Amino acid sequence: MTGFNVDDELVRKLAALLDDTGLTEIEYAKGEESIRVSRGTTAAPPGPAAISATAVAAASPAPSSAAGSHPGAVTAPMVGTVYLAPEPGSAPFVSLGDMVIEGQTLLLIEAMKTYNPVRATRAGKVVRILVMDTAPVEYGEELIILE
Amino acid sequence: MTGFNVDDELVRKLAALLDDTGLTEIEYAKGEESIRVSRGTTAAPPGPAAISATAVAAASPAPSSAAGSHPGAVTAPMVGTVYLAPEPGSAPFVSLGDMVIEGQTLLLIEAMKTYNPVRATRAGKVVRILVMDTAPVEYGEELIILE
Amino acid sequence: MFEKVLIANRGEVALRIHRACKEMGIQTVAVHSTADNDAMHVRLADESVCIGPPLASQSYLNIPAIVSAAIIANADAIHPGYGFLSEDANFASIVEEHGFTFIGPSPDHIRVMGDKIAAKSAMVKAGVPVVPGSDDALDNAQSARRMADEIGYPVLLKAAGGGGGRGMKIIERPDEVADAFSAARGEAAAYFGNDTIYMEKFLTGPRHIEIQIMADNAGNAVSLGERDCSLQRRHQKMLEEAGSPALNDDQRKSISEISRKAIKKLGYRSAGTLEFLYQDGEFYFIEMNTRLQVEHPVTEMVTGIDIVREQIMIADGANLGLKQKDISISGHAIECRINAESPIDFSPSPGLITDYHPPGGLGVRVDSGLYSGYRVPSNYDSLVSKLIVHGATRDECLMRLRRALEEYVIGGIETTIPLLERVILDPEFISGKYDIGWLEKFVEAEG
Amino acid sequence: MFEKVLIANRGEVALRIHRACKEMGIQTVAVHSTADNDAMHVRLADESVCIGPPLASQSYLNIPAIVSAAIIANADAIHPGYGFLSEDANFASIVEEHGFTFIGPSPDHIRVMGDKIAAKSAMVKAGVPVVPGSDDALDNAQSARRMADEIGYPVLLKAAGGGGGRGMKIIERPDEVADAFSAARGEAAAYFGNDTIYMEKFLTGPRHIEIQIMADNAGNAVSLGERDCSLQRRHQKMLEEAGSPALNDDQRKSISEISRKAIKKLGYRSAGTLEFLYQDGEFYFIEMNTRLQVEHPVTEMVTGIDIVREQIMIADGANLGLKQKDISISGHAIECRINAESPIDFSPSPGLITDYHPPGGLGVRVDSGLYSGYRVPSNYDSLVSKLIVHGATRDECLMRLRRALEEYVIGGIETTIPLLERVILDPEFISGKYDIGWLEKFVEAEG
């Protein structure tokens, strides 16, 4: 076995980058090679982990905090049910790879029988659709990622 | 089966890198092989200060822990009352600056009407007398310091 | 029985409701704002739904968001807690229209009791004593004198258009009526452009005493006795007792029975509270709260009855398992409200809880969503914990409260614990001789 | 009343006694070994005295050290807790000889009840049922047969010199007596050099049920009802209930009254417990504990009586404030003992508590000296917390216990919480049909 030839210099460089940028993790991949470095936040609050050990998983995923969310993420402005198409059976508002303009309707959220359009906050390409048709969503949940 | 061929040297090197860089995790992959090293932050105990905020001061001083005590300290082998002299009015067993020999009686501790001599555990000079005549002492309390 | 209940609230009361549900085998759905992602009840609930940003109007007061959450979580019922939407008749109606059970009274009862004039009038009809006074404007000094003689001195003149003390006059003796009336009328005209004047009995040092009632759909009604909530600062209760140190057994039985009969007559359902001012042996109804009260635990401690459990049972259509004769008061209980604020100037003190250790042992109950590492958000009410203590007697209860407050550790933020510790050592407080103005004076004297 | 009480114990019971004292306005002196410098009761006590190194024989069992501490701290009385010196008649005598009050029974009562034969004989005289059997050795198979017929099958033959199962034979039917007798005699002679054989009734699946009693110096005695402590592993109780799910009201009243009369006849003083085996409607006295029991809180929860407070009052010379007719049992209570040990193989798990959050809310009591940052020493018993839950019914109590165990966070060490959570979900446990062998089988079946 050839084993690794870990590049000290690279690790040190990434460590320095963590410092400079305030990031907690950097992952890098190229072809078959990848590297990930991370640094736990010092003095992590002791509490939540303790409690979470007893907490059962929430039915729907917790909303991403602002800090962790993708810059191109379009989030749910309300609780409700997602509709990806204007009517059952019709074509969806947008599909993966579509280019959208600012203000274009991406999907609907139904709340108390009202269908609320969720619009693109900027122009861009639809690179991920994170919700299924008729899925329930929480406030702040990421729906679509534009790039 | 060939199994693993763990590369000691590599692990040690990465561990050293964690130390140098302050990282908590390094992951590296190449082709089918990957390695990840991490080190949990040693969590500082959060507690005692919290409780002590409400605790009232003890009547007598808490005994010094072994770790913090003076190497020449003679400590109380029992709870009781200190007598620095063999009888009321007579000269004390020892005074500041006295040279004592190992086994010499330094003071008495009275417990349940029994007078127990506390003897020097080594030869030396009496540099401090930390208790007053007839003072109550706890187990482990520092009485006299020899140098 | 309900399979799933949505808890439309936050903080300690959301946790209280969660616990009652779990103890009945009911699944819970916590709805919460983004400021409460890490709240204990959210972590403990079977499901959670984020319903909006921190601003209460967009989350905990957001009716469409809460109803939508109930729909997507497939809940059977909604418990509104206290505050927020708990006394919003419109919310209760919408909840019912969407096919969910509202755990509380009917929207109609909420509506009537939410209107002070209508509530007072309904209570008078139901035989409940109110503050004596003129329902109509006083025409002249003569009619003012007649009214004052009838009510008994001192009396208070109030401007119909008024507020801020303008146009208000206290009359101690009959010979003061004429001058006071013209002075009040003049002020009222000058400040509000309206010289209409009313009169009511002036209470010089009343206590706040309230009666916890409970009724089912079948017309069964019980009273769970009184709570004394006279320890208040700026109309915020700080400490509540059951029973009141001011009442004798005849008085407590009498007002308890008057309240029970009234809510039976009103056809009320669920838990509720009749609030009274009390002075010189007389009770005067002020308002009815058609919801769970913050201070309900003191009643639970002395009666052994789980009020939230009974609310849920009644909402599910069950009849009260209790008759009035089954209810007995055992010992004495006190609740302290612990707020995240300075015990000196009452400025808010949100932030990270660095240490947390609640008191334990016999007769001690803590209702709190605090934990070590939790961050108290700055967006909401400052109530972070309720310490409730029970004892065989008031003296025993006070001694236990003292040692429990001493044991309580909340690090990282300021709390009102030091103020509470001083209050319960005060001889006047210990003697039980305090009225609704006492705490303000105590705080001023300290300052 | 005492001004200062020395607490000659450690752990949760030391904290329990400290709390009772503080609630009576009594100052406390904690005595402790160097392993317990940071114990919660040491931190909370008004004074503390270190009395020796970790080894119990040199600290918590060190009579001269404890008495000296009482002298230098100028204490009025000593509470021994449970375990350690609590049932050492010699200690009680020395305490009294030095002019301190021993908070417990007289040394004579401790001495008698500490001798199993004397205790049994005293109880028989006082009208308490014991396990039927031969007080004298059996001469031959004929007398063995007569005795067995009289007692009723199955019976157990035991070697007088014996132990470890040698010389023990269970006899199911009359025709087995002759063979079993000669086999037992042979084994006894071979293993112990003594062929003396006794016989007693063999209980196939008994429960452990005990009666809490309380008596004063004036001869007043009350029973506070029963506790069922059948959930045991290696003779260590793990969970206790009040009342017993196995008894009906007539049975509980009968054994309660038998116990009360017996201790009145014995002239006993302070709190005490009569332990019985119970099978097929019959009670058999096994021993009396002349001290506070670990599981006393379940009795406090259903009676509302503070047992430690009463102990202190009685020791101070007060008469019991209660008569038997004043005592009523309200609802159901369960205590879980939480040990610092693996819930799988029960290996000890001392160490640093990294996270600590006890459950709260209605009907939940926690007696524990744990706190976040505390280090559980390896030198003592593994009991680190008692979770006590009360409910209006056994079902309600079990549901509350379940949610309370789920809420309880003890991080950094292993505890028996996961085992307790599994036990209380077991249908047999829920049905209440378990005897003293049940838990061992449950654990084995799990393993």
Image (spheres, coloured by chain):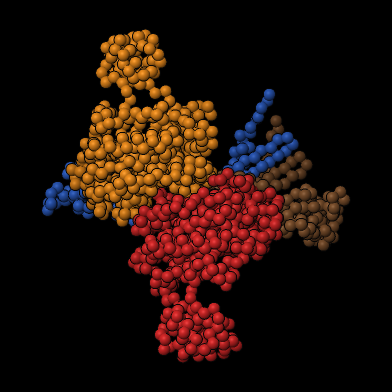
Chain colours: A brown, B blue, C red, D orange
| Residue C101 in view, yes or no | yes
Q: Is residue A13 above or below residue A122?
A: above
The residue drawn where x is 52% and y is 63% is: C262
**Residue ranking furthest to the right:** A90
Q: Position of residue B9 (x, y in %)?
A: 61, 36
| Left or right: residue A35 compared with residue C420 | right
Q: Position of residue C58 (x, y in %)?
A: 67, 63
Q: Is residue D442 above or below residue A14?
A: above
Q: Position of residue D29 (x, y in %)?
A: 30, 50
Q: Position of residue D290 (x, y in %)?
A: 29, 37
Residue sitting nearer the eye, D189 or B79 = D189
Q: Quadrant of residue D61?
A: top left
Tally of numbered tags: 0
The residue drawn where x is 45% and y is 51% is: C326
Q: Is residue B32 above or below residue D149?
A: below
Residue sitting nearer the eye, A131 or A97 = A131
Q: Is residue D17 above or below residue D146?
A: below
Q: Quadrant of residue C152?
A: bottom left
| Residue C170 in view, yes or no | no
Residue sitting nearer the eye, A127 or B131 = A127
The residue drawn where x is 40% and y is 29% is: D281
The residue drawn where x is 20% and y is 52% is: B134
Quadrant assignment for the N terminus of chain D = bottom left
